[in-house]
Image (cartoon, rainbow, N blue to C red):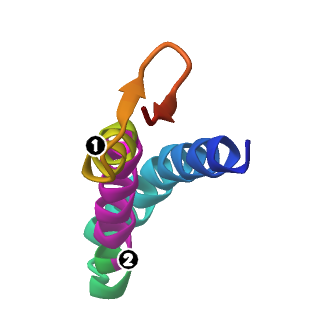
């Protein structure tokens, strides 16, 4: 249950970083301030990384299960061992 809350929290953080990144990047370009532009681009990059991580979370769970010698049940989302 905690893993699901963490995944949703990361997804919300990624979604909130997008407008923040665009706002700071836009202000940095408009006012010719490099630090604001760099912060905005950093927010957008971090958002992209968080989004990528959450979209590939199931892959890593399945991979860990298979590496441990189990069989992943997609319906119950549980690693099963014989």
x and y, in percent, of residue 20 in the image: 50, 57
User: Which residue does the numbered mark 2 point to in the structure image?
Assistant: 39
Which quarter of the figure is the N terminus placed in? top right
- Could you tell me which secondary element the residue under label 2 belongs to? helix
x and y, in percent, of residue 30 in the image: 30, 65
Q: Nearer the viewer, residue 26 or 44?
A: 44
> Which dot marks residue 66?
1
Q: Residue furthest right?
A: 1
Sort mark 2 into few (<14), some (14-19) or many (20+) by Cα contacts within 10 Å. Answer: some
- Side of 51 where 11 appears, left or right: right
User: Is-magenta flag for residue 42?
Assistant: yes
The residue positioned 27% from the left and 85% from the top of the image is: 34
Q: Nearer the viewer, mark 2 or mark 1?
A: 1
Q: Residue furthest top?
A: 75
The residue positioned 41% from the left and 59% from the top of the image is: 21
What is the CA distance from the residue labelled 2 to the residue labelled 1? 40 Å
x and y, in percent, of residue 33 in the image: 31, 83
The residue positioned 41% from the left and 44% from the top of the image is: 54
Q: Which residues are magenta?
A: 39-57
State which tag comes first along the sequence, 2 or 1: 2
- Give the number of marks: 2
x and y, in percent, of residue 77 in the image: 51, 26
- Side of 25 where 4 appears, left or right: right
């Amino acid at each position: 249950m905690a893993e699901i809350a963490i995944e949703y929290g990361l997804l919300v953080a990624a979604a909130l970083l997008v407008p923040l990144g665009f706002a700071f990047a836009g202000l940095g370009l408009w006012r010719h301030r490099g630090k604001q532009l760099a912060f905005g681009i950093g927010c957008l990059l971090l958002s992209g990384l968080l989004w990528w991580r959450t979209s590939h979370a199931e892959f890593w769970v399945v991979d860990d299960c298979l590496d441990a010698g189990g069989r992943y049940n997609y319906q119950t989302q549980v690693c099963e061992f014989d």
